[in-house]
Amino acid sequence: MTETALFTLRVVRHSANDTDYRLVMLHAEEGQFVTEGATVAALEGSKATFEITAPVAGHIHFTAAPGDQLAVGASLAQISASADRPVLSPEPSLSPGASCRFSAKARDLAARHNLREEDFAGLELVTEADVRKRLSPSVPAAPLRSGQGLKRVALIGGGRGADLVIDILMASGRQIPVCVYDDHKSLFDSPLLPLPVRGPADPQQIARDFQNGAFDAAIITIGSNIALRSRLFEALTERGVPLTNAVHPLANLAGGASLGQGNVICAFTNIGVCTQIGANNVLSTYCNIDHHSVMGSHCTFGPGVMLSGSVTIGSRVRFGTGIFVEPNLSIGDDAVINSGAIIFGDIPAGGLVKTRAAPTKR
């Protein structure tokens, strides 16, 4: 009997103005086994050509051929556990001439999660908020169970960092947040996706819930308190709770780059060739960790931190915003680099780099 596909690889919008893309080239053979992150195809939009990578490992079976014009949300390939071509699942019906209309963002999100028009019966215009509400664990048609194609993720912390991670997970198309653990809330009413709070950020309770099948992996969304991030990570790891990475699809991980577990990598961040990133780090938007750099664990980066090549970063280092680091330097454990700094020399462990915090009144 032919196996059902494990994962459907769909066309995701890469430019706000594009509604479809031309399939330029395939980088794998039909039925070939591909590893997670391997380049499998190239698409061409109105402004650029970009590569598509495999989100999971398995045998790839293409549903389109070079030269095809593919709409956003269309199937490009299916990845199966078997080299035999899988049974193709019916495509979600989101045609422009349908009884209900979708905004561009709503169409993208619905296609990534295989939602159909009938899931939004009674709505004339479906917005992104409607789709996120439909995906909310608080109002599911049926409980989301392990093995249904999406990794169910628990968020540790219900502050603004949770909104950041929810956006990344939803954009990934293969992870979905299902609950929050927070010491001070009974309901996490995010504008992106309301989630139930299962209890406080207690590692023992979180571990019990994981063992009982409440979620598949966790991620720490607390950003400002590095010491707490570190303690929670160690406690959860000791208790066997897997920590997942949240990597925005618009971030770039170059060849030879490696990530530990529990990292948050925001959009437009570049991880350079042969760079090594530890665990439980937070890299905000537009950061650059250039080639052959090495980073420890539990670090936090504000937006626009630019590391040149071959920089070595310790653990629990806090970076502000708009920082530039020259190549071949080292920054020790527990250092703090304030916003706007330009680093020309090594920073020792526990070092503090100050910059002017505010303009002086004349």
Image (cartoon, rainbow, N blue to C red):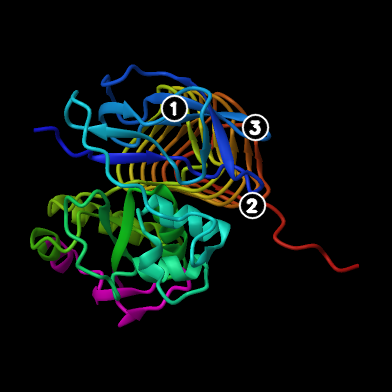
Q: Where is residue 245 drawn, in percent x and y?
A: 34, 46
Q: Which residues are magenta?
A: 180-207
Asked if residue 158 can be seen in this view, the reply is no
Q: Earlier in the sequence, mark 1 or mark 3?
A: 1
Q: Earlier in the sequence, mark 2 or mark 1?
A: 1
| Residue at which label 3 appears | 344
Quick check: 360 left or right of 236?
right
Q: Where is residue 348 drawn, in percent x and y?
A: 49, 38
Quick check: 48 left or right of 113?
right
Amino acid type, label 2: Ser
Q: Residue at x 18, y 39 (%)?
A: 4
Which quadrant is the N terminus positioned in? top left
Q: Nearer the viewer, residue 102 or 255?
A: 102
- Examine the structure image and report whether residue 339 is included in the region drawn in magenta: no
| Residue at which label 2 appears | 339
Relative vertical location of residue 68 with respect to residue 174 in this rendering, above or below: above
Amino acid type, label 3: Phe
Quick check: 213 left or right of 262?
left
- Binning the other alpha carbons within 10 Å of mark 3 as few (below 14), some (14 to 19) or many (20 upward) gives few
Per the rendering, the mark at residue 275 is 1
Relative vertical location of residue 224 with respect to residue 299 in this rendering, above or below: below
Q: Nearer the viewer, residue 73 or 261?
A: 73
Residue positioned most to the right: 362
